Image (cartoon, grey):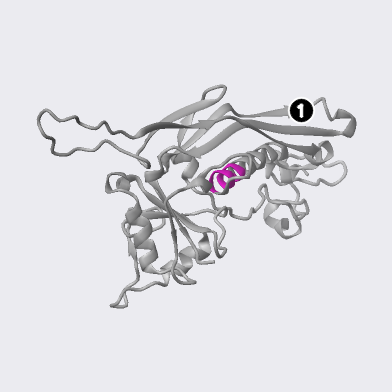
Amino acid sequence: MEYLRSGKAMEIRAEGDTSTTPADSNWTLAANGAVIPTSIANKIIEQVKNISPIYAMSTKYNVPGTLSIPYYDETDGKITVGYQEEFSEITATSGKLKSISLSGFLVGALTKVSRSLMNNSQFDILSYVISKLSEAVALWIDNEIINGTDGKIVGLSSAKNVITSAAANVTADDLVDVQDTVPDVFQPNCVWVMSAKMRSAIRKLKDGDGNFLLNKDATSKWGYTLFGRPVYISDAVKLEKGKPAVYYGDFSGLAVKMTDNFNMEVLREKYAEQHAIGVVAWLEMDAKIENDEKIAVLKLKA
């Protein structure tokens, strides 16, 4: 146990031996390395999870109560400019000021940790559990802002700029249509978000000369760009027919309201009679698109 904790070799002396120099028969690291008990490494290998940068790129509001975000809508009318005749009435025209409202949905998670497990572990299991709970919350947020839930967080599920693929499989033309849906003024901050399987399918697409569509880019995190923009992977994007398969845009067009910032508490007394410690996490949030022009979605043909 001392070796596992400190990494120092233990000495076993003959009975009555008070010398400071170990005898040849004593156990030392060099001579007995092969018989040192097997130990458990101070780490746990985890399954890698892909999470998008959408939340990080979103526009965040940290305010209490209901938040109303006004926007200008020209769907049913707009300001028109034209030639006029002197002494003739000019007709007034305009768009409409509308708004989106974000409330707050309470979200929580609780997990319990055995005190026996903590006492018998060679590493800080409580810190590990806290880290895993934080990761679970991050993955939950990523899924909600992408897929939404009926009657709760809407997220990107309300996107109006939706392109549906003409064929069963994604084509280069589909990707061009999605990218061109976003106005040029927003293009510098745009990124692609998709599943790993969709990226694999796109990687196999070629132009008429047999060149792959993905462009090598040493400055990109992944090493490639698609039509000049970075590609990110999220496990929250599902590759299903009739469902959104690719998201593209400047995701500052997504508004995320945090009424109560993410906070976590360790409950040391509540579960004492269970010989356990609780870890609870809370947040209150909502998310909706505040600028439809910034975001486009590709759906696969049903």
Point out the residue furthest to the left here: 86
- Label 1 Cα crowd, 10 Å radius (few <14 / some 14-19 / many 20+): some
Q: Residue furthest bottom?
A: 209
* Residue 109 x/y as whole percent: 71, 37
Q: Quadrant of the C terminus?
A: bottom right
Res 15 quadrant in image: top right
The region drawn magenta spans 139-146
User: Residue 144 falls in which quadrant of the image?
Assistant: top right
105, above or below 156, in the image? above
Left or right, 21 with reference to 224: right
Where is residue 226? Give x, y as percent: 36, 60
Where does residue 125 sit, x and y in percent of width and height? Answer: 72, 40
Residue drawn at 42 percent across, 43 percent down: 251
**Residue occupying image coordinates x 35% and y 60%:** 177
Count of all numbered marks drawn on residues in the image? 1
* Residue 91 appears in the picture as rendered: yes
Residue 215 against residue 275 in the figure, above or below:
below
Q: Residue furthest right?
A: 273
**Does residue 225 appear in the picture of this structure?**
no
Looking at this view, is 297 or 34 the one in front? 297
Q: Residue at x 30, y 46 (%)?
A: 188
Q: Is residue 142 magenta?
A: yes
Name the image quarter holding the N terminus: top right
Q: Which residue is mark 1?
A: 267
Secondary structure found at label 1: strand
Image location (x, y in percent) of residue 3: 73, 45
Q: Amino acid at mark 1?
A: Leu
Left or right, residue 282 beside residue 299: right
Between 285 and 204, the residue placed more toward the observer is 285
Whether 91 is among the magenta residues is no
Q: Nearer the viewer, residue 104 or 135?
A: 104
> What secondary structure is the stretch in magenta mostly built from?
helix
